[in-house]
Amino acid sequence: MSDALLNYARETLEIEIEEARRLLTRLDDNFLCACRLLLNCTGKAVVSGMGKSGHIGKKIAASLASTGTPAFFVHPAEALHGDLGMIGSEDVLIFISYSGRAKELDLILPLLKENRTRLVAITGGKDSPLALAADCVLDISVEREACPMGLAPTSSAVNTLMMGDALAMALMRHRGFGAEDFARSHPGGSLGARLLNRVHHLMRTGDRLPVVDSRKNVMDAMLELSRTGLGLIAVCDASLHVAGVFTDGDLRRWLVKGNSLNDPLVSAMSRPGYLLPAQWRAGEALEALHQQHISAAPVVDSEGVLVGAINLHDLHQAGIG
């Protein structure tokens, strides 16, 4: 039984891969037409489709929306009961139907024409009513479904998804849509946290900022280390320019050598210490701390003035890691 199941699975994948390869020959003027419509669209891309085409359409709409092409999904049945009002003449409708003969199209197509809404068809029916009414036709036809009965949309579903991805990625790259743009539409994810958060958004300030005047002694530094619990303090002059840092490790090494807590702090601190710019992205700060093999650092502005401090825990707590 196990061998048979694996053979069925392999056959399914082989058929779908073979059909998907045929898409490469269909990236033609129709694909360019669809790209131009969406690049010049002053409204939104509206994706629609019934059944499994609709499920894939939701993914295509989401991919477009997150990669620089404003888009949303409208169910065809809901469109006929009021949601068609969501589609304007400035929008581009991307309708998915393998046959191109979904019954909802009988009512939708005349209304689109009357409204002068541009239409992109994703279909396998090149002579269907949908294809004939469309401005551009993206051909996702297959010679063979992976379903042995030829009924369940398998190869055609994969082709639809891949054509949608090809469209979204082509548009994204043409627009120069980058990682920071992507992060703005994914602010809740780890990528958004890494790229959108800056060090100054997450750093410790005010009473939580560990800082000691450079004229103080080691005892003063030890007390500040205990008070703030960051494992590090910034040693600054009167204008808050950082002269060095003093860490828990520096304290241990100083005492092991038999030195006194009453000694000047400047003789025990590390110079100049590693400082993080306040404008750095949080992801950059995390990588820098790892590269320096340290867990915390003072944060300075463009003039080198102390404005905060941050450690790995602060970054991990913000979802960066």
Image: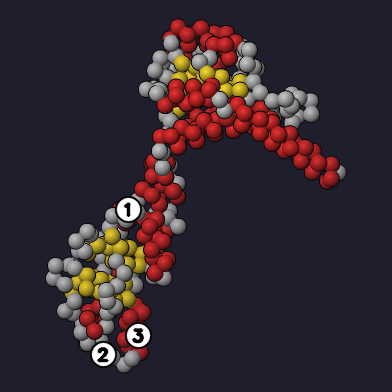
N-terminal label among 2 and 3:
3
247 horizontally vs 110: left or right: left
| Quarter of the image with the C terminus in it | bottom left
Could you say whether the residue bearing mark 2 is in a helix, strand or loop? loop
Tell me the kind of residue under disc 1. Answer: Arg
- Residue indicated by mark 1: 198
Instruction: Give coordinates of residue 184: x percent, y percent.
Output: 38, 41
- Answer yes or no: is residue 227 visible: no
Tell me the kind of residue under disc 2. Answer: Ser
Instruction: Give coordinates of residue 229: x percent, y percent.
Output: 33, 70
Q: Are marks 2 and 3 in contact (CB under 8 Å)?
A: no
Could you say whether the residue bearing mark 1 is in a helix, strand or loop? loop
Picture layout, residue 114 above or below residue 257: above
Residue farthest to the right? 1
Label of residue 253 in the image: 3
N-terminal label among 3 and 1:
1
Whole-angstrom CA distance, mark 3 to mark 1, is 33 Å
Instruction: Give coordinates of residue 230: x percent, y percent.
Output: 33, 69
- Foreground tag (2 vs 3): 3
- Answer yes or no: is residue 35 visible: yes
Instruction: Give coordinates of residue 283: x percent, y percent.
Output: 39, 55
Whole-angstrom CA distance, mark 1 to mark 2, is 39 Å
N-terminal label among 1 and 2:
1
- Foreground tag (1 vs 2): 1
* Viewer-proximal residue among 223 and 253: 253
Picture layout, residue 238 above or below residue 106: below
* Mark 3 surroundings: few (<14), some (14-19) or many (≥20) residues within 10 A: few
